[in-house]
Amino acid sequence: MGGRPGGAVAAVDVWAAQISQAHPMIAARKLKALRNVLIHAYSHVDLDTMWDVVPTDLPRL
């Protein structure tokens, strides 16, 4: 990430591409979109929904 602006975004883009290539069944673009919501719109995240998603959906990944 190198401490430069946009470094984290570039790293997430690389990560999503690597995940998509290695594991096509994983919706890496949706994971990236969720990450963006959690980072930028965290005040609008429904914590009850997130706590349902973590044990229910995350293990399938």
Image (cartoon, grey):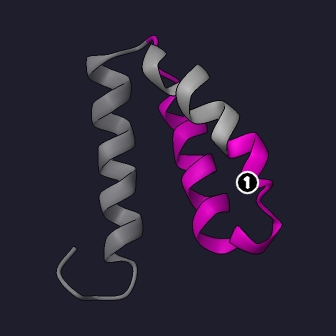
Q: Is residue 56 above or below residue 46?
A: above
- In reply to whether residue 23 is colored magenta, the answer given is no
The dominant secondary structure in magenta is: helix
- The residue beneath circle 1 is 47
Q: What's drawn in magenta, residue-wise? A: 25-50
At 62% across and 48% down in the image, what residue appears? Answer: 34
At 77% across and 46% down in the image, what residue appears? Answer: 48
Q: Residue furthest bottom?
A: 4
- In reply to whether residue 39 is colored magenta, the answer given is yes
Q: Amino acid at mark 1?
A: Leu
Q: Is residue 35 left or right of residue 18?
A: right
Q: Is residue 3 left or right of residue 51?
A: left
Q: How many marks?
A: 1
x and y percent of residue 2 in the render? Answer: 17, 81
Secondary structure of the residue carrying numbered label 1: helix
Q: Please name whichever residue, 37 or 43, is drawn nearer the observer in this view of the structure.
A: 43
x and y percent of residue 26 in the render? Answer: 46, 20
Residue 44 visible? The answer is: yes
Q: Is residue 10 left or right of residue 48?
A: left
x and y percent of residue 28 in the render? Answer: 48, 33
x and y percent of residue 37 in the render? Answer: 67, 60
